[in-house]
Image (spheres, rainbow, N blue to C red):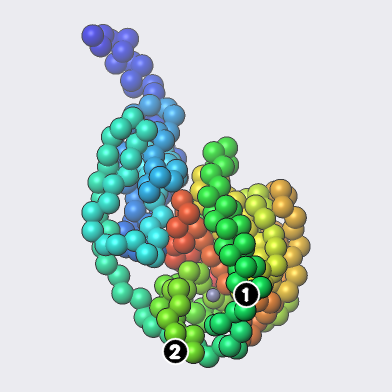
Amino acid sequence: MRGPAGLLLAALLVPPAGAAAPAPAPFPGGIAVLPLPALGSLPPVARFGGRRVLVRGEAGRWVAVVGLGLDLAPGRHVLQLADGTAVPFEVRPRRYPEQHLTVPRRYVAPDAAALARIRREQARVRRILARYSEDLQPALALSPPLRAPVSSPFGLRRFFNGEPRRPHSGLDLAAGAGTPVRAPADAVVADTGEYYFNGRTVFLDHGQGLITAYMHLRRILVRPGQRVRRGEVIGEVGATGRVTGPHLHWGVALNGAMIDPTLLLAERP
Ligand SMILES: [Zn+2]
């Protein structure tokens, strides 16, 4: 039986007020923002597609902020809470525009050695994007990593030399070589490396499954494990990897899903 003491306890153990969650954008490449039927002062554990999902307190309730992959089928999906509760939600369709590019043939038809390297690198990126750093509190309003026009938006359905490729999983910012690239929020450097397609790359872990990536850099100015503050310079724009000229490819992943970085921007780049 729940007596007056129980009621008092329930009143005390409510989710914190917290900062506002981003606006819902429930389509592939977007974000679902789902109020959870859970009380208590500790955030409930929620999973989507087997992956831990970011949960934050907002206006006295718990809210899941779920990254929706570009390959997710529109329709009904389900978020699972650790206590067995299912939270259904709807993913709406979105049609992204097409882009046709001509690139050097070795990038469209890599040889066996390059293919082996590409597979190793894909596995490494999957491991990085699978991180869930519970103790880091991510800011969900990001600052632009630099100020430059968008040369290629998120989600473009790309064709290289006429062959369909994976859709564009980040945002291209047309800044000149050497332009400083800044952390969009506090983070820990998850990894750095030189990749076949992505060139010199920095991955930042902002916590709870929010990972951001900076590709084609000329110089990398941070080391794995290093803590960086919002606005700190982490590298310089370059043209390393599969590119036709210098630019920053900025990727944002939430629970392993690449989402449109502009959805978390506090202001336009
Ligand atoms: Zn790009």
Decide if residue 28 is on the left or right side of residue 134.
Answer: left
Mark 1 Cα within 10 Å, few/some/many (few <14, many 20+)? few
Along the viewing direction, whichever of 103 and 251 lies nearer the viewer: 103
Please report the residue visible at 62 percent of the width from the left and 79 percent of the height from the top. Answer: 111
Q: Which residue lies furthest to the front in this view?
A: 112
Label drawn at residue 24: none
> What mark, if any, has residue 112 been given in the picture?
1
In this rendering, the answer to whether 140 lies above or below 172 is above
User: For this view, does 228 lie left or right of residue 102?
Assistant: right
| Quadrant of residue 117 within the rendered picture | bottom right
**Is 45 drawn above or below residue 75 in the view shown?**
above
Quarter of the image for the N terminus: give it: top left
Does the CB distance between marks 1 and 2 fall below 8 Å? no
SS state under label 1: helix
Q: Which of marks 1 and 2 is nearer the N terminus?
A: 1
Estimate the x, y position of residue 59 in percent, counting from the top left. Answer: 36, 39
- Residue identifier under label 2: 162
Snapshot quadrant of residue 124: bottom right
Q: Can residue 185 be seen in this view?
A: no
Q: Which residue is drawn at 56% across and 76% down?
A: 173
Disc 2 residue crowd, few under 14, some 14–19, many 20+, Cα 10 Å? few
**How far across and down, in percent of the image, does residue 200 sit?**
69, 69
**Distance Cα–Cα, label 1 vs label 2:** 22 Å
Q: Inspect the image, locate mark 2, and give the three-letter code of the amino acid beneath it.
A: Gly
Task: Identify which residue, 222 or 48, lies in the foreground.
Answer: 48
Which residue is drawn at the image coordinates 62% and 68% (left, top)?
Answer: 116
Secondary structure of the residue carrying numbered label 2 = loop
Kind of residue at badge 1: Ala
